[in-house]
Amino acid sequence: MVGFDMCGLTPAPVTPFTRTGEVDYEAIHRLGSWLGSIDGVKGLVVLGHAGEGTFLTQEEQVAVIKAFVKSVDSKIPIIAGITGEGTEVAALEAKRAKEAGASAGLLYPSHGWLRFGYQEGAPQDRYRRVYEVSGLPLILFQYPDNTKATYSLNTMLDIAAQPGVFAMKNGVRNMRRWDTEIPVIRREHPDLQILSCHDEYLLHTAFDVDGFLVGYGNIAPEALLQLIEAGKAKDYKKAREVHDRLLPVTKSVYHRGSHMEGTVALKHALVARGILNHATVRSPLRPLENGAEQEIHNAIKLAALARVA
């Protein structure tokens, strides 16, 4: 069978930079080795939105994959975000990722679709061709419902039936669609692993999934594993307790003006946890407003997320 077990937590780590803007490989080692040492963490997705993957050169992307593979000592899979605009471009990106040591790819929609939408059959062709060229097992990525790059239920079912597709990262962010579509996908593709990426809606989605694939996993892996366990046990009381304890963190990281600011906030939270020394990001991301850093550090303390030794 293509793929591997993702029934647990799969963090999407940030890409640390030095203060002068280069990739910080020592910090990658600290972050990757810490996350990889936590029981229940099933893999790491690098070069995604949280990882500022589209802001890196091709050479940097390859080097980051190799660095994270080394950081976990190959004990858990490294999954690469595949973000290239054109299908052939994405296929070659996936091939490079596999050669660099990635065990799977999280295939993003062609980003032109965000504005213009897509022709019928185009997403299915993208998954088919990327797997055909690279041989890299793929995770279906469902974008938010308020974008034109979101896939219809039939499109998701078609993609899930294709060779090489073994899991789905669903971030539809429309709970009406979530509640009606997830049961259908489960029924039609019972072997497809379903992962929530709703960093700000994890309580609602915890009871329907095999695991979480979230940037949030950078900063609170211990608590998110408790939430996953409670969700699988259908223990709403316990899940709610974890959710409420994390709510100050959720607000300070994900309830900001733009979801993109969440990446900057994640780096501040990793400073608070003792993993990163500073929160440097790469343009077009910008530093947060005055006071945000202290707000995030206070939220980490309030949620009892201790500094990592």
Image (cartoon, rainbow, N blue to C red):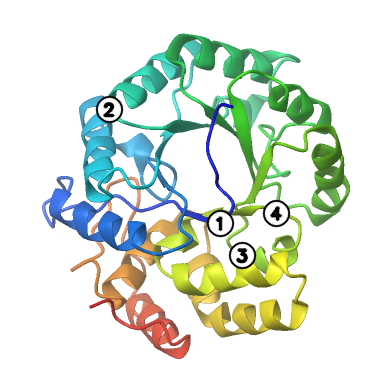
The residues tagged by marks 4 and 3 sit, at their Cα atoms, a distance apart of: 15 Å
**Which residue is at a point 43% across and 42% down the rendered structure image?**
48
Direction from residue 241 to residue 180 in the image, left or right: right
Position of residue 158 measured from the top left corner of the image (x, y, whole percent): 76, 22
Q: SS for tag 3?
A: loop
Label 2, on which residue? 100
Counting other residues with Cα less than 10 Å from the Cα at mark 2, is it few (<14), some (14-19), or many (20 or more)?
some
Q: Earlier in the sequence, mark 3 or mark 1?
A: 1
Direction from residue 170 to residue 153 in the image, left or right: right
Q: SS for tag 4?
A: loop
4 or 3: mark nearer the eye: 4
Name the amino acid, label 4. Answer: Val
3 or 1: mark nearer the eye: 1
Counting other residues with Cα less than 10 Å from the Cα at mark 3, is it few (<14), some (14-19), or many (20 or more)?
some
Q: Earlier in the sequence, mark 1 or mark 4?
A: 1
Q: Is residue 151 above or below residue 208?
A: above
Q: Is residue 49 above or below residue 271?
A: above
Q: Would you say the residues marked 3 and 1 are in contact, meaning their CB atoms lie under 8 Å apart?
A: no
Direction from residue 195 to residue 254 in the image, left or right: left
**Which residue is at a point 48% across and 21% down the rendered structure image?**
85
Label 4, on which residue? 209
Position of residue 172 measured from the top left corner of the image (x, y, whole percent): 71, 46
Res. 139 in view: yes
Direction from residue 169 to residue 223 in the image, left or right: left
The residues tagged by marks 2 and 1 sit, at their Cα atoms, a distance apart of: 25 Å
Label 3, on which residue? 200
Label 1, on which residue? 8
Name the amino acid, label 2. Answer: Ala
